[in-house]
Image (cartoon, coloured by chain):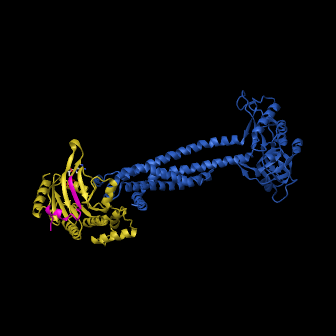
Chain colours: A blue, B yellow
Amino acid sequence: MNFWRTLRVAWEGLTLNKGRSFLTTLGLIIGVAAVIVMMAVSAGAEAEIADQIDALGANLIVVMPAFQPGGVAGMGRARSGLAYPDDLEAIRQGVDGINGVSAEQSTVQEIRTGGNTLSGISIVGTTADFLAVRQSAVALGRFITDEDNTRRNEVAVLGSGIAQELFGEQNPLGQRIRIGSVNFVVAGVMERKGVVGNTDYDARVYIPLSVVFQRYSTSRFGGDTLNTVLVSAESRGAMEQVMQDITMVLARQRGVPTSEPDFGLMTQDTVIQAAASTTEAFRNLLGWVAGISLVVGGIGIMNIMLVSVTERTREIGLRQALGARPRDVRLQFLLEAITLSLIGGLGGILAGVGGSYVFGELGTMRTALVPMSVPLAFAAAATVGIFFGYYPATQAAQLDPIEALRRE
Amino acid sequence: MTRTEDDQGADDVEKRVIETSGLTRVYGRGDVAVHALRGIDMTVDPGEFVALMGASGSGKSTLMNILGCLDRPTEGSYVLEGEDVSQLNKDKLAGIRNRRIGFVFQSYNLLPRLTALKNVMLPLMYNGHQSLSKGEMRERAVSVLEAVGLGDRIDHRPNELSGGEQQRVAIARALVNDPSLVLADEPTGNLDSKSGDEIMALLRQLHRSGATIVMVTHSAHDAAKAQRIMALRDGRVTARDLGVEAARRLESVTSLEGEAR
Ligand SMILES: Nc1ncnc2c1ncn2[C@@H]1O[C@H](COP(=O)(O)OP(=O)(O)OP(=O)(O)O)[C@@H](O)[C@H]1O
Ligand SMILES: [Mg+2]
């Protein structure tokens, strides 16, 4: 019997018991859906990491104070911050191959103009090198300068969104705004940058770092000390050398041995690793779910095929009597199993694509559908069908025609 | 006219359809072994219509299964149209069943979910030697269904047909690949006498058109429609050309035997 006719016969066999066939495919539907969701979540996590790297800026080195061994965790002198401006200056002067050194210290304040009030705005104190380090640009006016920092000028550079909200069509340059209880003059407006990672760059306001320390700092972080210093290397290749130099220069500056620095360095690679390890656990879990459901689904198919062979023994005997060879019978039941699996695969693809979408929409997890996962899932389902359909199909093919015909 | 042992040698030119020698079939082994056939030598010539009688358990069905290539003998040879088929493999036997043998069962054995037409088309589907198109298959199936008088029932399913009609569908199915041998194991066994007579009339008509038929029956009335009656007892051939009167006696004996059980 030719392939297509056998496929027809297999299909007719399946439609004999639609409800049962559907229930049998449920395991596979779950398995295939899990494969697709898993891949979508992985891809989403990767995109998330890529965004974090973007947010960090390429070739960025983050310098942080280290936890002090011996201090009680989280208390007293558990951390001793990096000094402003001395540590910054030491790196700027002592390390070659860098685009800039910057620091950011944020506070959340209310902004008022003559008519408008915006509350809960992120105010970022920083230095002139911010532009180089964060790969940002000014659209209007100027950015914070070194002079602003040394003189503690009360000038502000607005994110594009803030400028729009406060001044609309009006020119913001030279306008007065009140941030918390301090009056500032608007010196510039940033270019649109949008949301990167979790940060909406357009909804921030930049002021000199020294002003944050003077006007908004609480003593919690120890006065004029920083939690992070950001260094941008000129190239990825230069990173290794730059990191070594920073360690040496900063250790000398802070009077600690280079072998036991009281600070640490972090790069995008460290961030990638950290992010990857958290998503990996989830990915592994889903991978196991997918694998186990595929196997369970396959066993379900094998089970139902064995039942089907038993129920239809007489039919098999008759077909043999009419000239079906063992291989014709095997192909018929194998195709039945494969068809069943492929239906499961199709259902799984629908459920998986839908599931990925719902996951993404709910915001529980970022997902990005991987086009390859669809043929992959289909192939997985087909493989399960062949693998678990083979045994029942062979059982059917090996039946003795007379025995089979005699069965009730 | 009936053939006898003596004149068989005369037409060597024409190959015998069936020629067996020393066929035995043992079910199981050791203490529980059942010797269903104990050395069957028989011949059937082209165009013959042979009835096979014998008590229940005498080995008729066992013999028919071997003649139909559904089973292989334990010992002995079976030459079908000049080819020894007694030790062929499963694939070869399937091919022979498909193209050279038409088997009619006592219980019709139609697939319940298929229409009469589809049931008759089944053997065509497994005929790898002839790749007929769907349309050609349909055409052939329709023409045999018409030949058995069911031209107006082709789209009926078995549960919409009477027993006699179902058996006619089964006969159409046996004929659709134009076999050289038609085997029928108690084809009227499940039918009332009227339907049984219709089936017998059909088989006779088939015989007149040249078919070679071997039929198992318990009824002397049916056996009388055949050209020659063979008798089996305990796995051995006891008569090769039994007269109708003898067949009647045999029938009463076997039915007595049947009652004695
Ligand atoms: N599969 C089997 N296993 C064991 N013994 C069997 C098997 N098939 C048949 N037999 C035995 O072989 C003998 C012949 O059986 P067979 O079916 O050929 O008889 P029969 O002449 O067709 O009888 P009936 O007229 O009742 O159909 C019987 O004794 C039967 O019990
Ligand atoms: Mg029998």
Residue B115 screen position, x and y as percent: 34, 66
The residue closer to the viewer here, A367 or A166, is A367
Which corner quadrant of the image does residue A256 belong to? top right
Give the side of residue B26 with respect to residue B90, left or right.
left
Give the side of residue B1 with respect to residue A184, left or right.
left
Residue A225 screen position, x and y as percent: 80, 36
Which corner quadrant of the image does residue A115 belong to? bottom right
Which quarter of the image is occupied by the N terminus of chain B? bottom left
At x 81%, y 58%, the residue is A168
- The answer to whether any part of residue A104 appears in the image is no
- Residue lying at the far top of the rendered structure: A70
- The answer to whether any part of residue A49 appears in the image is yes
What span is colored magenta in the figure?
B1-22
At x 66%, y 49%, the residue is A47
Residue A277's place in the image compared with B24, above or below, is above
Residue A374 screen position, x and y as percent: 55, 54
Asked if the stretch drawn in magenta spans residue B20, the answer is yes
Give the side of residue A12 with respect to residue B250, left or right.
right
Residue A134 screen position, x and y as percent: 78, 47
Give the side of residue B104 with respect to residue A15, left or right.
left
